[in-house]
Amino acid sequence: MDKAQVLSYAEQYAAQEEAQRSKGDGRSSIHYPALFLFVGDKVAPAIAPVLNSCERKWDNAGGIMAVHAAAEEAGAAGGGKKEGREERVMTMPLPLAAGHDNRSVRQAVYRQFHEDSRYLAEMNRVLRRLSNSIADYGRLYSSFDVIHLSVITRVDDPLNVLLPEITLLARAILSQSFKSVQSDLYTLINEREQGENFGYSSSVGLAFLRELEAMQLNDFTFAAPLLVTEEDLSIPVKHGPSPLFDLVYVLSDKNERGMMSPGGMNDNYEIISHISLLKNRVTSAADADAGHGGYNNMTFKSGIRGSTGRQGYATAGFSGVRRPNLQIALAVLYHAFRQLAAQMREGSQLSLRERQMLLGLDEAALRERAAALLPDEAGLSEMTGLMSHGRPSYGELKQLSLQEAEQLLFGGGGEAYFESNFAAEAARRTADADPLREWRAVLAAQETAVPAVTFYQLAGWTADRDEAGSVLHQLRQHMAGLRAVRSAAEEELEQLYAESVERQPFQRVPLLDKRTVRNFIHYLFSAVYGKRYELLRYESELALCRRLEAALEQLHAESIRRVKQMEALEEELRVLALESIGRASETTGENIMEYYRTVTEQVMKDIETRRGPGIFFSERYMGSMAQLLEQGGTAVVERLIEVCRKELLAAEPFTFSFEEELLRRANVAAAYENRQVLSREELFKRLYRSLEEGAVVNVRLFEYTQEHRHEEKYFFGDSGSEFLRYAFGADETTRIYRLGFVHEQRRSGVEKLNLMGGFHLEDLLYYRNGKVYYETYASNGYLLHGLPEEQLPALK
């Protein structure tokens, strides 16, 4: 079996189902326009995933704009200008970081930007063009008063030394079109990619965090001639005193427990799009009807501000569970195969007599066929024309035995004639017999009959065991009887040959010696060679039986080989299905094998009810399993995949939404002692716990130094669904966090976003670890800032 072929089928089904069900998902709309500003070369991989996620989730995502501020060459090469959205993803050139000495690259980029006016001029042109493009999509939004600006950067990217200039210029230009610009910063930490440069990378990252600390102070001010007109006239842009960003989210590829996220940075890209939606979503009537609180930005900001009044930083975690389509496809493939094998094993329940007659192994058929192997017995009369040796008289013959008389008359001529014209011809006809070829046509027809005769039955019928049902055993018993009869016939022939001529009952003609001798010759060939003909018939039947025995043994070997092929395929499909379920989350993988065994059996039974018994072995479906197995297990699986894809997985029980499918799986009937099958309550409990554990926040903190912790948790899904009703009441009495729902008609799954804030940068484990490297590199002459040291806050 080709494992890749099976996995490809499952992956294709999963992708098709995901696309189909996502189309049926209700999508939220954002209230105000949104702009994503990606700063630095290292953040380029985030562009496409963030925008793709928005396009999947947002109904009016067609108006989303993005700009990538990157080094000139990187911006030209990448910039996220892919997947047909070139007009909505623009690039702004920044000085090249490559080529500069690591000891001073951040400072060099900062100085080059401020000394070379063409960078600022081009940024003005791009941002004005971007602002005009956003206006073109105004009809998509409920209001054009506010724009949400999401700035995204990597902490260890040298180009983020220009973050204040880039952000404030973007805000200044956008403020000319919008009454308010709400700015958030998403700071990404990718510890997996630090590799051998962990020391330098950590020092650059900490340098940015130190600058970020300054940007977020309540007394942060900034003034610079950032606006540039077409005549190259400069206009100052001023900010503050206030924090530069409304909220700053710190997102790492290492979660709160210190483990690398299975999804890597992709989880953070999903978080960015979900937070952007949460803060800018059009509230629907269903939200109010549900009675569950939605997101409130002011409440969250207030919640993460500690008792000292110092504004905290935020982070998030994200998880989702979806209908386990890949696992379903593999489970159905396994159960369909298992069901077909079970039908083949049941097959026809013919009696021994019927089995023998089907294969031509009953005694009457064997006798008839053995008789057909011999030339016509009437041909014995032609032996009387044989030339005798000399002309012995009857007087010379009568004292001899029959064998001696034959020898005197014909020498070995009679025996040679019989051997040539009877025994050799019978042997030739026996050798030409090909029982397997004859049986194949019969068995091929029986394989598609109802009930069928398959290699499962043949393996038992041809087994070498002393059982009444084995045609091989019965054939061997018949052969034993033939050997006994043949031995008796040989003895009779010997006795006849030993008798004297004088005692034989043939007509003697007195005075006519030649006539008497001729009568004796007729008697000799009739009596003696008649007996030899009878003996030849026994020997021919025995030879035929030996060929039939060999054919049955070969048929048994073929049948056993096919049975073992089926068993091996079944085991391989079972292992693949179980392995895929094992890789699924603890929750989405529960009860799959039990539930889809019942579903698959019922769907197959419905098809047989509509189209007739044995339909799955017709040419439209599987056809001859024996022929497929001759081509190999891959051919069987390939045909079965087509049957599953076109007939089984297209059936109504496979069209249920995520929650419908989950509920049915939870309610699968099972024996009480089967502890592996979960109740609905237990399944919901595990699903709830799985979502919570998967949504652990993506940042590692020194918890004992964190002054304040504020948490809010949001489910994305149908708030009226049974699972979300369960989730709302799960820990209602002990809940110390704010719980909200983003109501969306979801067929494909449910998602959870956990927000946490109130910590400060010095609480980050990344900050604590990087501080040592930062101080070491700075003390060794590395110029890690564009601003003078005295303008930066002290390290904590």
Image (cartoon, rainbow, N blue to C red):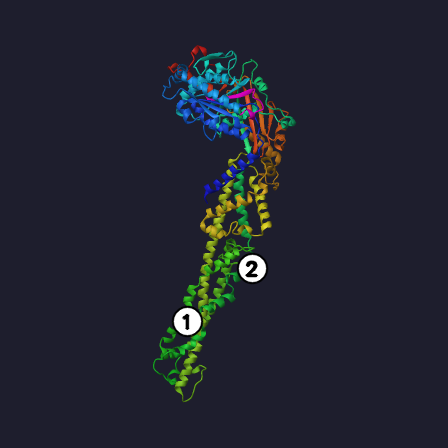
Q: Residue at x 45, y 19 (%)?
A: 125
Q: Foreground residue, 714 or 162? A: 162
**Disc 2 crowd, CA 10 A, few/some/many (<14, 14-19, 20+):** few
Circle 1 SS class: helix
Residue at the spot x=52%, y=67% of the render? 364
- The amino acid marked with disc number 1 is Phe
Give how far across and how far down residue 405 sits, in percent. Answer: 38, 79
Question: From what the image shows, is residue 592 above or below residue 355?
Answer: above
Question: Would you say residue 504 is visible in this rendering?
Answer: yes
Tell me the quarter of the picture where residue 676 sits. Answer: top right
| Camera-side residue of 117 and 314 | 117
Q: Decide if residue 250 is in sight here.
A: no
Query: Which label is found at residue 351?
Result: 2
* Cβ–Cβ under 8 Å for marks 1 and 2: no
**What residue does disc 1 label?**
422
State the image coordinates of residue 451 (x, y, percent, origin top left).
56, 55
Quarter of the view holding residue 311: top right
Question: Is 24 rendered above or below residue 141?
Answer: below
Categorize mark 1 by other alpha carbons within 10 Å: few (<14), some (14-19), many (20+).
many
> Which amino acid lies under the numbered mark 2 shown in the image of this protein?
Ser
What range is drawn magenta here?
A: 137-154
Residue 87: x and y, percent? 47, 27
Q: In the structure shown, which secondary structural element does the residue marked by tag 2 occupy?
A: loop
Horizontal and vertical percent for residue 388? 36, 80
Say whether residue 153 is magenta: yes
